[in-house]
Image (tube, grey):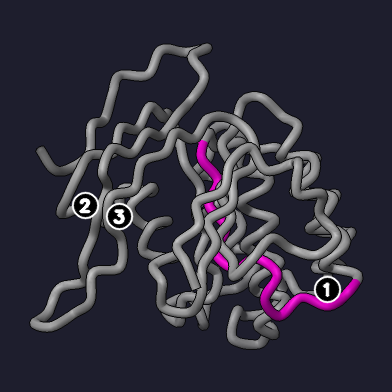
Amino acid sequence: MTGHDHLPHTPGTAPYLRAHGLGWQPPGAGAPRLLAGLDFELGPGLHLVQGGEGRGKTALLRLLAGLLAPDAGRLERLLASQAWPEPLDPARDAQQAADWLAEERARHAAWHADAAAALQEAWQLGPHMVKQMHMLSAGSRRKLGLLAAAASGAELVLLDMPFAALDGVSRRVLLELLEDAARQCRQIWVMADYAAPAGLDASLFASRIDLGE
């Protein structure tokens, strides 16, 4: 059997993702198989997908999000909501940052306005909100996406290479955010990166999925 199982979600039930022999190969003749035989269970807390360049980290996040379908094995998803903002999408270049964030806010019923305001201040994004997205640096756009993910209140929060293009101060804010995410009991946070970030206690990760170097 291949594919996703989208299970009915009962309010108050803890979200989870379960993989059974999960695999995926990019389309196209001769494309190498990126993911094979993955078995894991992800519940509330912070999880790490780690691996070298081209090992399938982003592909696995896309599978978890339901944006890709596995070609082997099975993925069970018990979720009511998910967040994977993509502020670096070139299609958003002409959009004002405030309008982009307003769309994210409208997308998530459990949006935390206080968290959004606190992160906007911590990351000094206020002056950038009136700018079009193409006027923001890669770091500022990434911080805007992290803000949207953290404030979403979604049961599944996906972060792809979240530390890329961040300065030292912004990194520390993100580390604190991830520490908080690791200790909560209502959301699944999954971050993909080459390795666990320096400065974050390794014991905070509820699980690690190592895709190899």
| C-alpha distance separating marks 1 and 2 | 42 Å
How packed mark 1 is, by other alpha carbons closer than 10 Å (few <14, some 14-19, many 20 or more), is few
Identify the residue at horizontal 89%, vertical 59% (top origin). 122
Please provide percent x and percent y for residue 105. Answer: 58, 47
Q: Is residue 64 magenta?
A: no
Residue at which label 2 appears: 70
Image height of 129 relative to 117, above or below: below
Q: Quadrant of the N terminus?
A: top left
- Tag 2 near tag 3, CB within 8 Å: no
Boundaries of the magenta span: 156-168
Disc 2 secondary structure class: loop
Residue at which label 3 appears: 67
Viewer-proximal residue among 82 and 115: 82
Disc 1 secondary structure class: helix
92 relative to 122 in the view: left or right: left
User: Which circle, 2 or 3, is nearer the viewer?
Assistant: 2
Identify the residue at horizontal 74%, vertical 63% (top origin). 197
In this rendering, does residue 116 appear at all? Answer: no
